[in-house]
Amino acid sequence: MNDVVYDFIPPPWFCHIEGTNHFPVSTFGTNIYDAHIPREARLRALEFGPKGYIETTNFQFGFYNGTLSHVMRLSAHQVERYANNLDGLVGKPSLIDTNGAYQFATQWLAAVDVDVVDLNKLKWDVHQLRYLPRHATNSVLLPIYYVDFGNKHYPAIGNLQAFDAPLVSVEVLGTTKELQDLRINVNDLSLSRRPLLLITNALDLIRAPNPPTEQLKKAPSLQTNSVRP
């Protein structure tokens, strides 16, 4: 807990596990909203799992539906490392090639219990980031590699155009052979073999009164601009 410097956790009712049909996972299935079934029984039948993210000084760990969904190396709060300083990578040699990026990606995915055997049955590709430096006319390749597996198509909705997104994506920094970002598509977490993190006493926690809080004691040396106690 001492390593956590920031966290975002939605209220419990946004943390119930959803099935493929976007209904809450429950023994009652789609009858979870049936008012004829006692409310207490329906509440007890819900499954709750972590959602949101926690940050240390160097990484952000994201969770969805009780599963680890992403790991991102940080340079600042919610900012991926080098996201605002790509110029600093211009001209830097890479210690790996596309094959090396693929090898590192599959090793890290296996380490977080993604099924690499099934993953390799999908179409995958490795591409290198092309970047146009400030005040330059020609783009250059940076030592950042993206290893993408699978594909999920999202149809056009309203003003949003149709687009495709990988099922799993890993970003590798070639100058240090470090993981930059590992991301599993939250709309398809089926490739994760890690057991769900379930909060089995969620309803009891929600109903429990908050623990007593200690009032701030105003010390003689403490100055405040607040007129509130």
Image (cartoon, rainbow, N blue to C red):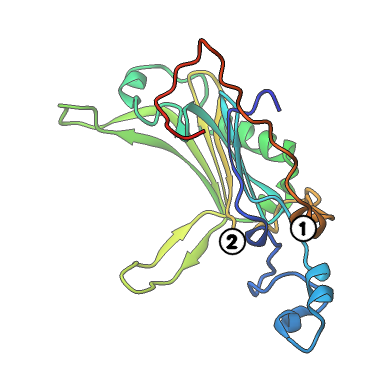
The mark found on residue 44 in the picture is none
Q: Above or below — where is 181 with respect to 9?
A: above
Residue drawn where x is 82% and y is 70% of the image: 45
Q: Quadrant of the N terminus?
A: top right
Residue drawn where x is 47% and y is 35% of the image: 228
Q: Earlier in the sequence, mark 2 or mark 1?
A: 2
In-image side of 31 versus 4 (left or right): right
Q: Position of residue 193 (x, y in %)?
A: 77, 51
Q: Position of residue 69 (x, y in %)?
A: 63, 47
Q: Above or below — where is 37 with respect to 225?
A: below
Along the line of sight, which residue is nearer the eye, 226 or 146?
Answer: 226
In-image side of 160 versus 105 (left or right): left
Could you say which quadrant of the image residue 79 lies in? top left
Q: Above or below — where is 10 with respect to 28?
A: above
Q: Residues within 10 Å of mark 2 (few under 14, many from 20)?
A: few
Along the line of sight, which residue is nearer the eye, 71 or 217?
Answer: 217
For disc 2, the marked residue is 187
For disc 1, the marked residue is 207
Marks 2 and 1 sit apart, C-alpha to C-alpha, by 30 Å
Q: Which dot, 2 or 1, sits closer to the camera?
A: 1
Q: Residue furthest bottom?
A: 36
Give SS at disc 2: loop
| Badge 2 amino acid | Asn
Q: Position of residue 207 (x, y in %)?
A: 77, 58
Q: Residues within 10 Å of mark 1 (few under 14, many from 20)?
A: few
Give SS at disc 1: helix
| Badge 1 amino acid | Arg
In-image side of 56 versus 44 (left or right): left
Q: Position of residue 99 (x, y in %)?
A: 56, 33
